[in-house]
Amino acid sequence: MKKALLLSLTLAAASLMQAQETAAVRFANRVYSLSGKPFMHKLVCEGCEVERIEKLPEGLQLLSRPNYKYLYGVAPKAGKYTYTVHLSNGQQQNVTLVVQDELPQPTPFMGILTWNAFDEHISNDIILKISDALVNFGLRDAGYRYMCIDDKWAEHDRKEGHLNPVSSKFPDLKKLTDSVHSKGLKIGIYSDAGDYTCSGAQPGSYSMERTDATDFVNWGFDLLKYDFCNAIGGDTPAEAELAYHSMGRALDNAMTSAGKNPNDFLFYMCEWGGRKPWEWAANTGASCWRATADTRDYWSDTTYNGGVLQNIGVYKEIWPYTGVNRWNDADMLVVGLHGTGYSSNDGGSKESPKPGLTQDEYRTNFALWCMWSSPLTLSNNITNLDGKPNSLTGKEVTNTLYQEDLDIIRNADLIALDQDPLGQCAEPVIDHPEYIVFQKDLANGDVAFSITNLSGNEKQISLDFSTLSALQKGKEYSVKDLWNGKTDNYNSNSTFTATVPVHGTAVYRMTLKK
């Protein structure tokens, strides 16, 4: 009898261990909200279920969908709350909810980075021209407010321990930031957690975090893009977290010492996703982090894993980890490059030997980044969005498709999806070899969905609305096409059909009819 009992207990323990090994917990353990605002936290566990929540904050409730459970409601007053998620496999996960009256990044930041189009061809004058273009082409008013200087702005060696701007390019950084601020814009700078940056052209900030953070703040910058090339302190997730935390703490201290609000400075991690930053990056002080390889101006790029198709593969897995003030970044938009970028068009790929996406693929690039709540960072030469030739990038370029490019990047309906205050990443609901469908919860109760054609032919794709678990069953919805603005009415029990071009994306917003 004792042997039988012992065997039974042993088998039960083995079964529990196996369940814990096969269960995949996929949700953030540090989340944010503005006080009094709608809050959603999706709790995904493959191979197990959420059984209950202990110490659930007031105003939130646990709700269910077919494949996961989620917390939903209105965030409580400002404070730090801890609730415990109990899982059916015996595991439990503590989650910290940070509620504040203001946050560094309540919605994903929008702006432009200089790397893809300009590389080393950056200077004080070019930054001012790009800033003027943000204003003149209506991009600032559309939400693109951060003008970000990327790699190659500093000399190869430090001067008296400080990063030394290339004087022929940037004679006075404080004067530059003041000028950009006068246009109603913000401005960012670049460094690296290693001893040298990714280009090798300038020193990184390893062991010099305090000095560099103080300089960035005193120069008047509002954002730091912080890369992870040439890491000296090790490149494991734990070591990366420590390196990023060192700079995050230095930036907070520098802002405080300057009498400024640390919430007014954005810390943008650029680790490329290899160490799963969505699991730990919120602990560093960063409010967004790269989740993908460098995005290339190709549909599929197996050389660098940077094509739009490869990014879709990443976001099929990491969607539960996005939320307010914790944004997974799909890297710079390549809309409008048309094969003229530097590293973004370097080398080509077997799948796309001709550099540059098609216009339909650029629309997919923009639509999916908005569905995923990724930061929206342009990387094309926006100074030629008037169709006139210019050579600011070091190449003579005329953009004959400038009006189409402007229509894509200024699409207010799509930008509203990206900037939605609920902060949710769209989740895949149909993953077919020839197409993929995402759905996205929105703060006012609306639901967005997208249909991306992965095949090499134009396709008519039908969607049974019952697969969109965010919809209320049997209810009438108005369905707005976010490309052409047309609206039709559908019941949530009906079927919807869209004609989608090769590698194109149809995207819609559904509003419950009263």
Image (cartoon, rainbow, N blue to C red):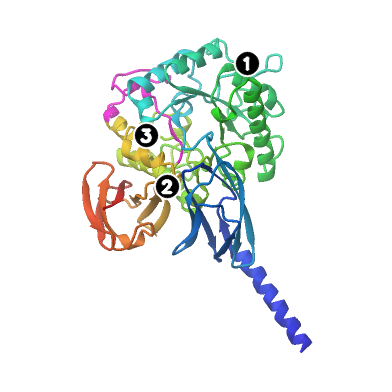
Quarter holding the N terminus is: bottom right
Please give the label number shown on residue 309.
Answer: 2
Over which residues does the magenta segment extend? 374-403
Q: Earlier in the sequence, mark 2 or mark 3?
A: 2
- The residue wearing badge 3 is 335
Q: Earlier in the sequence, mark 1 or mark 3?
A: 1
- The residue wearing badge 1 is 164
Residue farthest to the right, as pictured: 2
Say which of 465 and 125 sits in front: 465
Picture quadrant of residue 470: bottom left
Task: Please report contact status of discs 2 and 3: CB closer than 8 Å, yes or no.
Answer: no
The reply to whether the magenta stretch includes residue 281 is no
**How far from the left and from the top, in percent, is residue 293?**
52, 41
**How far from the left and from the top, in percent, is residue 138?**
33, 25
The reply to whether the magenta stretch includes residue 395 is yes
Q: What distance separates the C-alpha of mark 1 from that of mark 3? A: 33 Å
Numbered disc 1: secondary structure: loop
Task: Please report contact status of discs 2 and 1: CB closer than 8 Å, yes or no.
Answer: no
Say which of 75 and 198 sits in front: 75
Q: Nearer the viewer, mark 2 or mark 1?
A: 1
Q: Residues within 10 Å of mark 1 (few under 14, many from 20)?
A: some
The residue lying at 26 percent from left, 50 percent from top is 479
Give the residue type that dot 3 points to.
Val
**How far from the left and from the top, in percent, is residue 16?**
65, 71
The residue lying at 63 percent from left, 15 percent from top is 164
Numbered disc 2: secondary structure: helix
Residue 29 seen in this snapshot:
yes
Give the side of residue 68 with respect to residue 236, left or right.
left
**How far from the left and from the top, in percent, is residue 68?**
49, 61
